[in-house]
């Protein structure tokens, strides 16, 4: 099992130590570095900046939001970054949620599965460069012939020859239909809030996708990259308390109360009552109480926290469950160096 450094997206200000962490990750033996975007910093620009200082680590987005760019614009960014990095780019895509898609990008969130299939299909055409890129739609029609069209649009193919027609595309997916679609059309799954306890359920979703006619990959050459906090510590209680507010935010405060994909993930884990309590408290502005309502087991299901022996034991469990890469958030060089012996072993 390999390790990826998850840098995420920026907060109010750019991180001050990201470049140092990236360089240390390459030295330590991390396989990849990932950036994200929400409604502030974008994912591609920092990745290109960090990539210019590295030679080996793969450079991934986890994730680029579909509604932020047309599929051809995303393909342009991906093929550009792949050239600049010498073939190290991983294009991670995700649909985001209705609050961001409709509130920030001003687009409809409807039919996310159909939109994803069509979006990836257009990108594959650009990267293959076997002919002019056309798509009948309905979500991303090329050439555009809808309201306001001049009728002058014509099919094109990229001027720049992509470095790799098979540049890997990974999808961020949380529900059964999304995960099955990911196994069918993508090269890897970016799994957030993964728990090995439910590996049989995830594998059933994946197998449904692998079994579909024309599926791109099989389990043998498909990557499963799970985001997980891996924290080496002798004070597990302190780390659990530190993580509780973040868990409360994602479970109780992210997305709309009527449609929070992160909350749905935890409901599938069997935490329906806990999710309801956390959500009600958080939405009422009682954030401290919401954090206090997050039980230890809810955090430990999707994180690895403990001394080195415990961490190594749990890594073996995750690997046995099918995870091929752990995406780890690292906050400091000290934390990175403490993880180094595990990453290198």
Image (cartoon, helix red, strand yellow):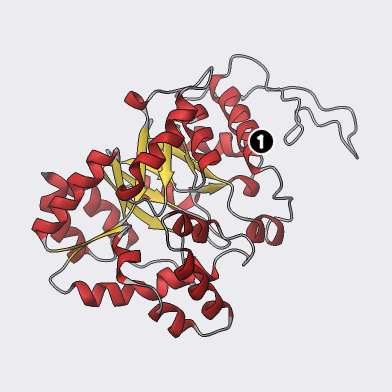
Q: Position of residue 287 (x, y in %)?
A: 48, 82
Q: Hey, which quadrant is residue 221 in on the image? A: top left
279 is higher (above) or lower (below) than 323: below
Residue 1 seen in this snapshot: no
Residue 163 found in image quarter:
top left
The image quadrant where one finds the C terminus is top left
Q: Quadrant of residue 55?
A: top left
Q: Is 281 situated above or below 35? A: below
Q: Residue furthest top?
A: 130
Label 1: which residue?
114
List x then y, in percent, for residue 165. 48, 22
Q: Position of residue 271 (x, y in %)?
A: 43, 63
Q: Residue at x 51, y 55 (%)?
A: 37
**Callout 1 environment at 10 Å: few (<14), some (14 to 19), or many (20+)?**
few
Total numbered labels: 1
Q: Residue at x 67, y 22 (%)?
A: 133
User: Residue at image x 45%, y 25%?
Assistant: 210
Task: Residue 167 in the image: state x and y as whole percent.
Answer: 45, 28
In the depicted view, which residue is nearer to us: 268 or 265?
A: 268
Would residue 306 be found to the left or right of residue 156 on screen? left
Q: Nearer the viewer, residue 32 or 85?
A: 32
Quadrant where the N terminus lies? top left
**The one of 161 and 200 positioned closer to us in this rendering:** 200
Q: Is residue 86 above or below residue 129?
A: below
Q: Secondary structure at mark 1?
A: helix
Q: Residue at x 55, y 77 (%)?
A: 280
């Amino acid at each position: 099992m390999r390790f990826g450094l998850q840098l995420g997206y920026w907060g109010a200000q750019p991180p001050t130590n990201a470049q140092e962490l990236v360089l240390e990750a390459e030295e330590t033996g991390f396989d990849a570095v990932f950036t994200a975007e929400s409604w502030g910093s974008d994912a591609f620009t920092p990745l290109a900046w960090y990539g210019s200082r590295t030679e080996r680590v793969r450079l991934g987005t986890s994730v680029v939001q579909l509604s932020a760019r047309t599929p051809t614009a995303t393909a342009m960014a991906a093929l550009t970054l792949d050239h600049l990095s010498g073939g190290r780019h991983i294009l991670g895509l995700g649909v985001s949620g209705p609050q961001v898609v409709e509130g920030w990008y001003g687009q409809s969130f409807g039919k996310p599965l159909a939109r994803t299939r069509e979006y990836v299909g257009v990108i594959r055409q650009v990267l293959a460069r076997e002919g002019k890129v056309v798509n009948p739609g309905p979500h991303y029609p090329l050439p555009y012939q809808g309201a306001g069209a001049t009728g002058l649009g014509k099919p094109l193919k990229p001027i720049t020859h992509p470095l790799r027609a098979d540049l890997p595309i990974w999808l961020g997916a949380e529900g059964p239909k999304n995960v099955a679609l990911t196994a069918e059309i993508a090269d890897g799954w970016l799994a957030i809030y993964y728990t090995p306890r439910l590996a049989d359920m995830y594998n059933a979703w994946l197998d449904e996708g692998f079994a579909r006619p024309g599926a791109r990959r099989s389990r043998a050459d498909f990557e499963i990259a799970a985001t997980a906090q891996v924290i080496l510590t002798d004070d597990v209680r302190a780390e659990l308390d530190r993580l509780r507010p973040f868990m409360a935010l994602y479970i109780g405060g992210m997305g709309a109360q009527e449609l929070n994909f992160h909350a749905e993930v935890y409901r599938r884990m069997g935490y329906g009552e806990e999710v309801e309590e956390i959500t009600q408290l958080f939405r009422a502005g009682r954030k401290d109480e919401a954090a206090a309502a997050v039980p230890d087991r809810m955090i430990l299901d999707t994180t690895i926290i403990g001394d080195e022996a415990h961490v190594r034991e749990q890594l073996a469990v995750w690997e046995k469950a099918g995870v091929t890469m752990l995406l780890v958030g690292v906050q400091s060089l000290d934390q990175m160096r403490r993880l180094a012996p595990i990453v290198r072993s």
